[in-house]
Image: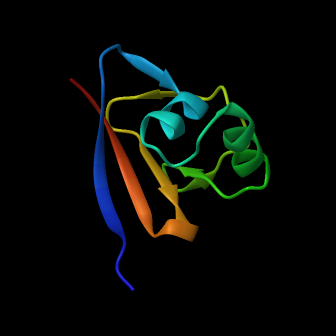
Amino acid sequence: MSTKSETLAIRDDMIRLGQALKLANVVEDGVEAREAIQAGDIQVNGETETRRGRQLHAGDVITIPELNLDLRIETA
């Protein structure tokens, strides 16, 4: 099964992981984002991330193995 890659364009230099997941419509709200992140379901740049407030910058990649999805952060 191949992994789907998408680009997530942000306006600022940085976005927090929970906000990025909401912006990408991967989760509906902050509670769902927190649950997915704390469960270890989210990776950033190949490493499992458990901090919802993790700062992401252009070039960072969020991987959601359950959805076979990679989100690359880019500045708009």
Name the quadrant of the N terminus. Answer: bottom left
Give the residue at the far left of this rendering: 76
* Residue 47 drawn above or below residue 57: below
* Residue 6 drawn above or below residue 23: below
Residue in view at x 30 percent, y 16 percent: 11
On the image, the x and y values in percent for residue 43 come to: 58, 53
Residue in view at x 60 percent, y 53 percent: 47
Residue in view at x 38 percent, y 49 percent: 71
Colour scheme of the rendered structure: rainbow
Q: How many marks?
A: 0
Image-based side of 58 in relation to 27, left or right: left
Residue in view at x 78 percent, y 55 percent: 39
Image-based side of 66 in relation to 71, left or right: right
* Residue 35 drawn above or below residue 64: above
Name the quadrant of the C terminus. Answer: top left
* Residue 56 drawn above or below residue 14: below
Give the residue at the far bottom of this rendering: 1
Image-based side of 13 in relation to 30, left or right: left
